[in-house]
């Protein structure tokens, strides 16, 4: 046996053990790492406001607390307003359910010449097996729902604390990171940090502005149609359609359509048509003008980044995919060397050969050119 073989085997076993230990630790800490990543991007988003308040003489910790408190109050107020709206609408729908059921039964009786009654339908529903199973499953799932809610609250608290520390101690964190790097690398790290702050803040700014415009437009429509809870529905449409990529518009429009349907079924069609038309206006007119100076990403790249982020990290990846790709694109654009593009018709979508020229003529011209040489 060679003298190096035992040491090589011990080294291989040690490396394999370290790999398994690292994999186990990563699996156990993936939730915490995800929360830290979300908190970091949230800190980047509020960094411009905190820095602006700090430059005016306010302590950075107090400025971070005020900005975070404003974000928290807005989020809690939105959830409470939306929850009260949904609760009131559900109560109204439950109270009006007998009327809906009577209208449906009358339509069925007139159309199919049947003799159904509401009492028979209600008895059949109350004594059905699927309703009993649903009630049993709901009763057993109360504990799971409570655990999920408590876990979500703890996760939000963790994200809030980490984002507060990242924003409040941003300069100290940058100094600690640069202290272990040579001067040349320090400039690159600070430049990357500045690009990340600009792109993340620009993404939040552009999305917030488009959410405001979308909310106002849908609020006007809902007020004209006389749909209840128009302010809450407008805020819902504005935020969900902008901060949930790709499918956010259709998820946001589903709730106003449902509420409008309870008022008049034709109003739901009006809301659907307005959502579709406004989406086209936003995609081709509003969004290019708003995002041209903040987050200039090609729509295909944005869609691909959202799909990749969803595949890697789920909903969290979908939310942070666009600012992350914008930061990477800006960073590469600052360091990748570019050259002047040659003046060729094929670059502009043209053809490099003469239109209508036969293939035989091109071959003869090529042979003639070689003969002249």
Image (tube, rainbow, N blue to C red):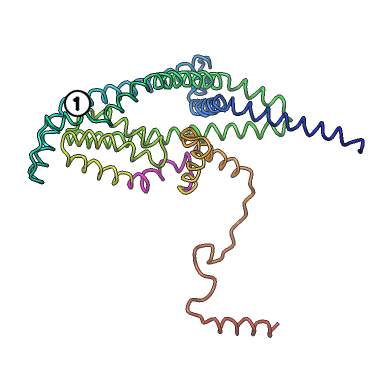
Q: Disc count in the image?
A: 1
Assess whether residue 260 is covered by the magenta stretch.
no
Instruction: Locate residue 288: give its quadrant.
Output: top left
Q: Report the residue at 71% width, 24% height from top.
A: 179
Give whichever of 39, 196 is nearer the camera: 39
**Residue 248 occupies quadrant:** top left
Magenta span? 280-298
Answer left or right for 337 relative to 216. right
Q: Main secondary structure of the magenta part?
A: helix
Give above or below for 21 relative to 252.
above
Q: Position of residue 139 (x, y in %)?
A: 33, 21
Front-lying residue, 241 or 29: 29
Check the image and report above or below for 55 versus 349.
above
Residue at label 1? 94
Q: Position of residue 205 (x, y in %)?
A: 43, 33
Which quadrant: the C terminus? bottom right
Residue at 91% across, 38% down: 1
Q: Position of residue 72 (x, y in %)?
A: 41, 20
Using a 10 Å C-alpha cutoff, classify the residue at mark 1 as few (fewer than 14 neighbours), some (14 to 19) or many (20 or more).
few
Across and down, in percent, residue 43 comes to 52, 25
Instruction: Look at the numbered disc 1 and give the secondary structure of its residue.
Output: helix
Residue at left offset 33%, top offset 44%:
279
Depth check, front residue: 255 or 169: 255
């Amino acid at each position: 046996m060679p003298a190096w073989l035992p040491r090589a085997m011990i080294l291989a076993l040690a490396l394999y053990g370290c790999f398994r230990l690292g994999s186990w630790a990563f699996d156990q800490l993936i939730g915490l790492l995800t929360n830290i990543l979300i908190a970091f991007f949230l800190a980047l988003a509020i960094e411009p406001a905190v820095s602006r308040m700090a430059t005016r003489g306010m302590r950075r910790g107090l400025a971070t607390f005020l900005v975070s408190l404003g974000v928290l109050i807005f989020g809690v107020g939105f959830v409470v307003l939306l929850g009260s709206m949904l609760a009131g609408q559900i109560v109204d729908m439950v109270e009006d359910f007998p009327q809906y059921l009577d209208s449906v039964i009358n339509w069925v009786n007139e159309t199919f010449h049947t003799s159904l009654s509401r009492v028979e339908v209600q008895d059949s529903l109350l004594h059905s097996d699927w309703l009993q199973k649903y009630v049993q499953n709901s009763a057993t799932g109360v504990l799971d729902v409570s655990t999920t809610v408590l876990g979500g609250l703890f996760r939000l608290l963790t994200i809030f604390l980490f984002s507060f520390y990242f924003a409040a101690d941003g300069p100290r964190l940058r100094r600690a990171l640069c202290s272990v790097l040579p001067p040349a690398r320090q400039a690159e790290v600070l430049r990357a940090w500045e690009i990340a702050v600009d792109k993340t803040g620009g993404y939040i700014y552009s999305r917030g502005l488009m959410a405001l415009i979308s909310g106002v437009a849908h609020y006007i429509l809902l007020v004209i149609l006389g749909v209840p809870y128009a302010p809450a529905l407008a805020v819902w449409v504005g935020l969900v359609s902008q901060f949930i990529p790709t499918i956010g518009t259709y998820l946001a429009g589903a709730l106003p359509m449902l509420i409008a349907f309870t008022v008049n079924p034709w109003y739901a069609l009006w809301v659907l048509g307005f959502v579709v038309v406004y989406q086209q206006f936003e995609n081709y007119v509003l969004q290019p003008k708003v995002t041209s100076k903040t987050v200039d990403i090609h729509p295909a790249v944005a869609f691909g980044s959202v799909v990749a982020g969803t595949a890697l990290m789920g909903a969290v990846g979908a939310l942070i995919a666009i600012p992350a790709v914008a930061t990477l694109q800006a960073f590469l654009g600052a360091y990748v060397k570019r050259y002047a593009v040659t003046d060729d018709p094929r670059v502009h979508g043209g053809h490099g050969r003469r239109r209508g020229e036969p293939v035989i003529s091109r071959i003869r011209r090529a042979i003639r050119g070689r003969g002249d040489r």
